[in-house]
Image: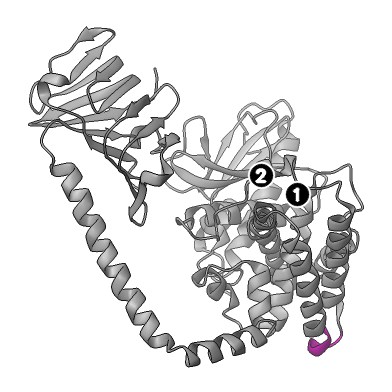
Amino acid sequence: MKAPPAVAAALLLLPGLPLLHLPSRLHAQDQADRLLRLHRTLAAIERDAIWPSFQPDSIPVLYLIPGRGTLLAGWGGELPQGFERLPGAREHGWRPEAARGAASTSVELDGRSAAQVVVDTAAPDATLLALAVHEAFHAFSGQARRPGRRFGQGENSFLVASYPVFDAGNETGVALEGRILAAALAARSDDEARSLAAQFLAVRSARQRALPSEMATFESLAELNEGLAEYAGLRAVALLAPRTGWTPETERMRADLLGRLNDLIGAPERSLRLRYYATGPGLALLLDRLAAKDWKQTLVDSNRTLQDQLAYSVGYYDAERRIAAEARARHDWRAVRDEAARIVTSLLALRRAQVDSVLAAPGILLTIDAQAIGGGIGLCGIDPQNLLQASQGMLLHTRWLRPCAGTSLQGEFNTRVVHDQGAGTLRAVIGAEHDVAITAGGQPILLEDAAARVVTGLAIASPGATLQSAKAEVTRRGRAIRVRLLPPA
């Protein structure tokens, strides 16, 4: 383990440190002193010890002390507005307010990802540290989010409202899975744990086949999201136990996890989403025991769920893989693979040519740029028969599209449109110049070449498109007009 940084001594609050005129100064100082001492222990956790590339002390943490204020730990650099630097502690700041109704979560602060922890002053140190690492892991996994990759994606929490909690058959399966997973974690031998893991996978697979596919996906992504964050907190406490004396806390947390797994459906008054705070870390801990050391990186690289990674690790798919290998050998898999690669390469070239053809057509080339409003352009109407994937993240609407983004964008295209989802843009040739009318607040506007103009109440009318935006910056260069959507004032 690496030693705490040299500045660690500066993290301790000195006696008599003023905490910005708080009404209960001594109590607030005691809490801040405790939290900084606790936060300092994160430096002892080496990068990769919990998860590949994750280093807990690299994520700033907002500790919200109810009725006292907010301690910002591990920030570094210029503090965000409203925070004052603590004397002798460059990386930490204090704000004498804590947001009412705030929750423990991951947040964005001054463009940086941070963890936010609502401090229960009666909670043990190990519990607070586990929660801080839990939320820091959320910040880390959010930064690692990539299109099409499960890790960092998060589940669709709206499905909590329609999950089949009144289906006794499904609930029976959930309860049984929890008990089997608890037994696997408590197994005396790896062989017994491996056998119980296979039982868990069989029961879960059978249950999830009867679920709507989006519900099974919800379960798996919730385990990757909340489950792995919970695992990160538990793992942090276990790693620090030898130097902090938290071995009893580690054992208590493990016993609590086994208890929750043995009673997954036994708290109907609470959200069903809490189940995955138990099954997720349970699966991760079982993988720590049974899988190869690189299972975490393999899970990310192979885009797997926790249950899939467990299945591969314990040989649950061995029969399937053997049969698939026989099929590949019999039906000349290499030739089929090479032909598929040729077709895909040809398709990409064809799509590039189609996009180039769309954008090279004569007339006004309009670009709608949504980066300033977060890049999200909704598709409120599409023609699925005339929608093509041009490349990864780029769509070609060959006939009609109705985009929408609140008051920032409403309209309709009756021509071919290139939608670059990654760049947050729509591009289309919308008609000859004399057929394109652009107004702001109902009045025609004249666009000078290379000049940018911010307008409100923008409207564009042409044979190929009719569009409205509450506020936008409009720029023209030759035949190209760019509309950069701006947040409403």
Instruction: Residue 75: give x, y in percent of width and height.
Output: 50, 47
> Quadrant of the image for the C terminus?
top left
Q: Amino acid at mark 1?
A: Arg
From the viewer's perspective, is residue 423 above or below residue 288?
A: above
Highlighted range, magenta: 188-192
Q: Secondary structure at mark 2?
A: helix
> Quadrant of the image for the N terminus?
bottom right
Instruction: Residue 249: give x, y in percent of width and height.
Output: 82, 64
Residue 483 appears in the figure: yes
From the viewer's perspective, is residue 401 above or below residue 6?
A: above
- What number is the disc on residue 273? 1
Q: Nearer the viewer, residue 338 or 275?
A: 338
Main SS, magenta residues: helix
Q: Is residue 285 left or right of residue 441?
A: right
Q: Amino acid at mark 2?
A: Ser
* Contact between labelled residues 2 and 1, with CB atoms less than 8 Å apart: yes
Query: How many residues crowd mark 1 within 10 Å: few (<14), some (14–19), many (20+)?
Result: some
Q: Is residue 166 left or right of residue 292?
A: right
Q: Is residue 475 left or right of residue 78?
A: left
Q: Nearer the viewer, residue 448 or 340?
A: 340
Instruction: Residue 358: give x, y in percent of width and height.
Output: 20, 44
Residue 264 appears in the figure: no
Residue drawn at the location 64% of the way across and 72% of the way down: 308
